Image (cartoon, coloured by chain):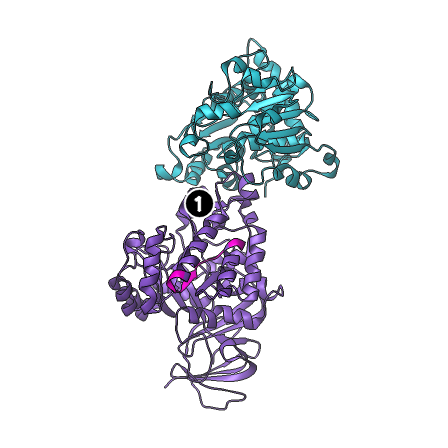
Chain colours: A purple, B cyan
Amino acid sequence: MTSLLIKNGRIIDPASNLDQVSDLLIENGKVTRIEKDIRHPVDQRLDASALIVAPGFIDLHVHLREPGREDEETIESGSQAAAAGGFTTICCMPNTNPVNDNPAVTSYILKEAEHRAVTRIFPIGAISLGSAGENLAEIGEMVSAGVVGISDDGKPVMNGQLMRRAMEYSLPFRIPVIEHCEDLFLSAHGVMNEGYYSTVLGLKGISRTAEDTMAARDIILARLTGAHIHIAHLSTRGALELVREAKRNGIHVTCEVTPHHFSLSDAACCEYDTNTKMNPPLRSEDDVQAVIEGLADGTVDCIATDHAPHNPNEKMLEFDHAPFGITGLETAVGLALTHLYHSGKITLRRLVELFSAKPARIINKPLGQLTVGTEADVTLFSAGAQWTYDVKQTKSRSRNTPFDGKRLKGQVAATIVAGKIAYQDLSLVNVG
Amino acid sequence: MPLRTKDLLGIEDLSLDQIQLILETAESFREISTRPIKKVPTLRGKTVINLFFEASTRTRTSFEIAAKRLSADAVNISPSTSSVLKGETLFDTAKNLEAMAPDVIVIRHSSAGAPHQLARVCSASIVNAGDGAHEHPTQALLDAFTILEHKKKLRGLKVAIIGDIAHSRVARSNCWLLGKMGAQVTVCGPPTLLPLEFEKTIRLCQPASMSPSEGRVCGSLKVTHEMDEALQGADVVMMLRIQLERQREAFFPSIREYFRYYGLSARRLKGAKPDAIIMHPGPINRGVEIDSEVADGPYSVILDQVTSGVAVRMAILFLLAGTKESEVEQRT
């Protein structure tokens, strides 16, 4: 029997509408008591008097690169980076090599995770075989093996009929169909957002309409099929308005926004730094404002990182040739606190909800809440601590971030997964 | 007077003073190319590497001749493929060249920003000889030099730039330069070949990039799809090369139709001022964007542009490599 007592933290649990300073007792991986002034013999104690105690954060969108590109990330290193970033659960996208389009790959990931990961890991399976967009993958078998959603992320499902079938077929399995919304004809050869900056920089633009039209198609298909469509890394005002309208009409649509899409605009591409190249690209200032409005008013359901590690050799290329994507696990919470909470756009409660209760509901897992009896996944953070992100200290195997050297306000202090300390920052906490 | 920059990456970053210094220096070098012995010892012992990742005859030769007339040692490297396909990154190529201590690396690359990325890692001066659809600063400078030769001023001149604006680094550099020098620029092309928010380029960046005293020079930029409107009263007509593969990419239906709406014929030219000069950065597609009759006509200054190119590039090499290092502000 192992036990951990978290003393005097401000516990914020949006799911149970709790926001109070209290103690929290964990025994055998479960929350057993939430009361003031708990006196109980325990193995470990943690003084959280300057900290927020939140349900463990969940990231629905991570690329772990294993199997296939272990030089960029592994299940082990990715989960360590996740824990350092305050995440207790991450969902890994299927665009590995081989693609996670069958239960054997799913089982492999889960087995590796069981032995080497410090966080929970839920795989997302492919929609189509090889994510090639032609034939359905064995969705049911993968669900049985443990996937929590399906997606061809990295690519959209361009074939509307296949997408319709995937949505219909997914219904009895009660999983979200997660779409990377991009009309590949409209975005062809683009490397950054199409607009003033792509014009001035002479870089081929990716039109916002490439995302908007695909989001519109998927929402229309969700209305037809009744399936749950989850729009990954939403980045445009147009797509946001479509989601808002669809929610109003009762269509089962959810969406996520990445930290880079609410903290940077396409002006950041001006130095041709390939760490500002991702897909969807950094958008215009107007889009940044739109997604922040969506995060505030509830249109956006959760924050997800789209953590996409790349080998430095590949990012050290011309902007046109460098791969899309940046790492994001370790900076997400700091960026959200800095750009959303400290700027007065959202409350702490809403921020916690975006990272916990809401993403848990999307994947239908009894996580993201802190009440007696729930899994003891806890994220502790300081809302006010100032720190500077130093990529040289990263737990990830990759370093492709535009946030190296960035000063942030709000820092993760400790990450607890099933009652075990997966990460702690010794400047903020000390477990004794 | 020093140029006060390590590299020449684009016109956008240059102040009016820097532009004028380059043009004045070029003026003083013009005469060298008319001598029987076309060589001065100014850059003796300096090394210039022409690193051309994209095919070019005119620009590469122009840089080579400019270097040689200043007695610099010029080396040409033309990797046949981009760095990705070759297996060596652009940075490794550049660092290897750098290890041989060149003073200037002139780079042309099909990817926008490649010279900027190099400038951050190289201590040699980097000269952008064209990067993707971004900038071609020496072309804009030689165009300005040529216009000044014929028109004596840029301020208030009506300049029409016609053709594939979207893919043109020449158009971008010229808009920055002509805008800073106070010309009234009209760009014209089919809507499919005009990039988004192009008209903002001069308006937005001018105040930021110019000191208040320079603010007195204020050009304008207009965008139109009607060629006759662009040509109306023009002092300078600058035609851009249309790449034939753009037809396959569905930017326009056929060359025949393109010429009908955006090609320069003698009849069409009648809308411009009677003494309007005709420019083209080359190589020209006769019968595609310009009729031979116009290209070879009395007001064509297309070959003068080529001649100007040598003087302008001599000036740039001199200002970058000839300036004492203590006078150079290190680029941050």
Which residue is found at the position 51% from the left and 63% from the top?
Answer: A300
Rendered position, B215 above or below A195: above
Residue A233 shown in magenta = yes
Quarter of the rendering occupied by the N terminus of chain A: bottom left
Residue A308 visible within the image: no
Residue B257 visible within the image: yes
Q: Nearer the viewer, residue A286 or B256?
A: B256
* Residues packed near mark 1 inside 10 Å, few (<14), some (14 to 19) or many (20 plus): many
Total marks in image: 1
Q: Position of residue A423 (x, y in %)?
A: 44, 71
Q: Nearer the viewer, residue A341 or A160?
A: A160
In the shown orientation, is residue B129 left or right of residue A117? Answer: right
Q: Residue A188 falls in which quadrant of the image? A: top left
Label 1: chain letter: A
**View extreme (top): residue:** B36
Q: Position of residue A38 (x, y in %)?
A: 51, 89
Q: Which residue is mark 1?
A: A187
Start-end of magenta stretch: A224-238
Q: Nearer the viewer, residue A46 or A330?
A: A330
Q: Residue B267 falls in which quadrant of the image? A: top right
Q: Position of residue A63 (x, y in %)?
A: 38, 59
Q: Position of residue B297 (x, y in %)?
A: 55, 12
Rendered position, A213 above or below A83: above
Task: Give the residue type that dot 1 points to.
Answer: Ser
Rendered position, B266 above or below A415: above
